[in-house]
Amino acid sequence: MYDVGLRFVPEVLSVEPFSEDLVRYDINVIANELHANSIRIEGEVIDRLVVATRIAHAAGLTVYFNPWKMNAGIDETREYVAQAAQVAEQLRLEGVDIVFVLGCELTIFTDGIYPGSFYGERGAWLAEQSRLAAAGSPEALKVLAEKTELLNETLRSYIEVTRESFCGVATYAAGLWEDIDWSAFDVVGLDAYRDRQTEKEYIAILKRHRRHGKPIDVMEFGCCKYEGAGSLGAGGFVVLQGANPDGSGIWEGGVVPTRDETEQADYIETQIGLMTRAGVDALFVFQFSMPALPTGEGAKDLDMASFAIVSTFPAGDPRAEQMPPWRRTEGFRRVSEIFAGFRQRHPARRSL
């Protein structure tokens, strides 16, 4: 999974500045060193997505084209999806092997389905309603059912505007808490992090989606790079609650985590094994790089709270001015080994 700029914080994109030279370098590393055959490219600025997609196509990769406008309302997002679908169709006609991803975890990242002004508030609302529902609250069960219907109504409208211009394969990146009507999609797309589930429970979650009779693509999975991050799955990032003016992190409870790249690498390897046993058709490691969270010493090592498998050097470090401005981690090396094995066993397959 490759980010070309998202607004986790409204005022700034997660990738800035955007360097076509660095994108080309990164994507060729993904294709050649990591032995990937597909890449999910996410970002808000459609022109950036196009640049990265053409580079990935030239590198021989299938592109999961994922326009992603965070915190916009349902109607604004629909218009954005329609615009992006037109662009994706043009790329398809150019010969790009492209899959259109028309959204990601809309309940959390779009305004208007779950209550809340940003993804943190919406996630907290979901956690509380899920707790109440698990305790048997009829009110919580009712409101979650209503939100599920609203989500599927929204997705049906998005796939309709997508089909008006895009004639290729389309999917959606669903959180595991989202109960999706997949009938209008070509592929079941799941952001399939594992935290509290046992291995058996996790495999069962994936296998349940076989009932749809469609390919199952795990659109993202991974963990952060500190001791204990694996058990937190997608929630590992919450250990970092902000940054001080000197660049040090504001760490949960005032405790700086202990960096552990093996924790991330082991999590990735274990999850790939479970997904392979479950028979998924594609999987995407989240994520290649996260320059907004650079590495450093001690409390300044914000990279510990990122899911990236390369560690970006901070501004002011001479290595940040070199190409590439990052270093490979243990997770990078482990992914390279595993994907090389996939390629040897399945040289003609688009996915695994």
Image: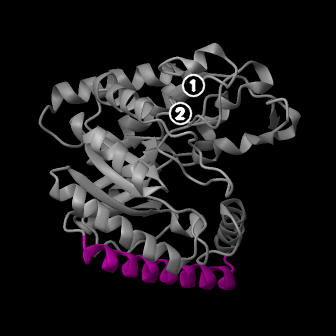
Of residues 167 and 25, the one nearer the viewer is: 25
Residue 107's image quarter?
bottom right
Residue that extends furthest to the left in the rendered view of this protein: 348
At which x and y percent is residue 46?
Answer: 42, 57
Of residues 12 and 266, the one nearer the viewer is: 12
Would residue 279 be seen by someone viewing this image from the given angle?
Answer: no
* In this picture, residue 153 sits left or right of residue 91: right
Residue bounds of the magenta highlight: 136-165
Residue behind mark 1: 311
Residue type at numbered disc 1: Ser
Q: Is residue 117 above or below residue 139?
A: above
Does the stretch in magenta take in 86? no
Residue type at numbered disc 2: Ala
Residue depicted at x 67% and y 25%? 315
Of residues 14 and 100, the one nearer the viewer is: 14
Question: Which label sits on residue 308?
Answer: 2
At which x and y percent is residue 17?
Answer: 56, 39
Disc 2 + disc 1, Cβ < 8 Å? yes
Query: Which secondary structure lies at badge 1?
Result: strand
Image quarter where the N terminus lies is top left
Residue depicted at x 58% and y 47%? 234
Residue depicted at x 35% and y 45%? 51
Q: Is residue 123 above or below residue 51?
A: below
Does the stretch in magenta take in 147? yes
